């Protein structure tokens, strides 16, 4: 199996930026499609973005609207989420996840999850 550890969360003002990282260990990282999800208090975990094993394909949730960018570095076993123009409604715990199949938009498509990193956007 693969172990995932997110980092890079924190407190930022509205309009600001953060870059989240997710470091993987345990198995060949390039075998896994990766996704980012988020969960706000009292809400279900929702899809943000996913990337294919070689990074050639990406799929974004509609609400992202060009504000977020996913990338991966298979040599460093890391996937990134660059978040710009942050809004208070982006406040949530952000999770990265790994799938041995394809880059699903459903959380049920991912077998491995990190512990999450808190992102708080103040108005």
Image (tube, rainbow, N blue to C red):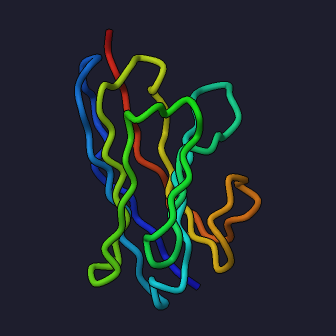
Residue at 32% in and 58% down:
21
Q: Quadrant of residue 84 in the image?
A: top left
Is the C terminus in the top left, top right, bottom left or bottom right quadrant? top left
Residue lying furthest front? 56
Residue at horizontal 51 percent and vertical 77 percent from the top: 53
Q: Is residue 46 left or right of residue 81?
A: right
- Return the x and y of residue 101 as percentages of the image width and height: 68, 77
Left or right of residue 20: residue 60:
right
x, y percent for residue 67: 37, 33
Location of residue 2 with respect to 11 vertically, above or below: below
Q: Which residue sits at x=76%, y=59%? A: 108
Residue 35, quarter of the rendered image: bottom right
Farthest residue to the right: give it. Answer: 108
The answer to whether residue 102 is above or below residue 122 is below
| Residue drawn at x 38%, y 19% as measured from the top left | 87
Tally of numbered tags: 0
Whether 35 is drawn above or below 98: the answer is above
Instruction: Classify residue 107 as left or right of residue 68.
Output: right
Q: Nearer the viewer, residue 77 or 66?
A: 66
Against 27, residue 53 (above or below) is above
- Give x and y (percent) for residue 102: 66, 72
Horizontally, residue 74 falls left or right of residue 59, namely: left
Query: Which quarter shows the N terminus?
Result: bottom right
């Amino acid at each position: 199996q693969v172990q995932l550890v997110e980092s890079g969360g924190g407190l930022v003002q509205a309009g600001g930026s953060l870059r989240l990282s997710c470091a993987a260990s345990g198995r060949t990282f390039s075998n896994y499609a990766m996704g980012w999800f988020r969960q706000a208090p009292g809400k279900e975990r929702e899809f943000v973005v996913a990337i294919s094993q070689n990074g050639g394909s990406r799929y974004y949730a509609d609400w992202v609207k060009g504000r977020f960018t996913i990338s991966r570095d298979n040599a460093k076993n890391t996937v990134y989420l660059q978040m710009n123009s942050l809004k208070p409604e982006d406040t949530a715990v952000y999770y990265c996840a790994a799938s041995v199949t394809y880059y699903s938009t459903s959380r049920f498509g991912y077998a491995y999850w990190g512990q999450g990193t808190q992102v708080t956007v103040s108005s």
